[in-house]
Amino acid sequence: MKKFFAIVAVMGVLTFGSTQLVQAQDAPAADTEQVDAIAGAESGGIHKELKTKFIEGTASFMSLVSIALVIGLAFCIERIIYLSLAEINTKKFLASVEAALEKGDVEAAKDIARNTRGPIASIYYQGLMRMDQGIDVVEKSVVSYGGVQAGYLEKGCSWITLFIAMAPSLGFLGTVIGMVQAFDKIQQVGDISPTVVAGGMKVALITTIYGLIVALILQLFYNYVLSKIEALTSEMEDSSITLLDMVIKYNLKYKK
């Protein structure tokens, strides 16, 4: 499916490029200057256009929205790094712990859990530490510590949602203030001039657009973070059940 979309995208780009080339070749001599002007504008790059719009939107509110973007992305990147480091080869880890318990070597199983990073290994270590206290104690320990680890995974997500909400709010605030300034200019001039109204409304709408773009960017990162948290939480639950099965088998085999 990915290859299909890639092929369609490439074909679309080639088709668009060939169409533009044909149109440029078929254009009359009078339109040559217009084509050159468009090409010169495109050669400036998108970043220059964004810089121009940023300046037009006034530095006060645009800077606040930019700060929200930077801080929000910092929290997103921190969560992504933390969650990526929390991921392990779960099947290999469970197989190692199970092999150690099959041999009756609980200390070896503890060492494996202690020397492995991630929430799953931490939950296993807490459960293995209480194996001699019975299956009920192990289960309570796994459930309690699993909740603690889930809290660690979700740490900082509330700040991301805060900046997702703040970005468009700051943009809307800039829009309202821009409209107020536009009406002030109309009042000063004493006439509804299209130039005066358009200038104020343009500044107002730029701040709104920028705030919405920032919110969309942060929302994409936030959804990615949530998907990783859900995947890790699911693995933690499945692994906890597997640990209880291992403890039951160990007790049946070595504590008769």
Image (tube, grey):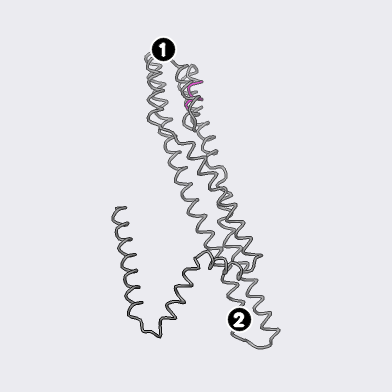
The location of residue 200, given as percent across then percent down, is 62, 77
- Give the answer, above or below, for where 137 lies relative to 151: above
Q: Earlier in the sequence, mark 2 or mark 1?
A: 2
Which residue is at a point 42% across and 25% down the rendered structure image? Answer: 244
Packing grade of label 2 (10 A; few <14, some 14-19, many >=20) is some
Callout 1 amino acid: Lys
Q: Which residue is mark 1?
A: 255
Most common secondary structure along the magenta stretch = helix
Q: Which residue is mark 2?
A: 197
Look at the numbered disc 1 and give the secondary structure of its residue: loop
- Give the answer, above or below, for where 113 lies relative to 168: above
Which residue is at a point 68% across and 88% down the rendered structure image? Answer: 190
Q: Quadrant of residue 234?
A: top left
**Depth order, front residue of 67/44:** 44
Task: In the displayed orientation, state which residue is furthest to the bottom.
Answer: 191
Which residue is at a point 41% across and 14% down the rendered structure image? Answer: 104
Labelled disc at residue 128: none
The location of residue 142, given as percent across then percent down, is 49, 29
What are the residue bounds of the magenta stretch? 124-129
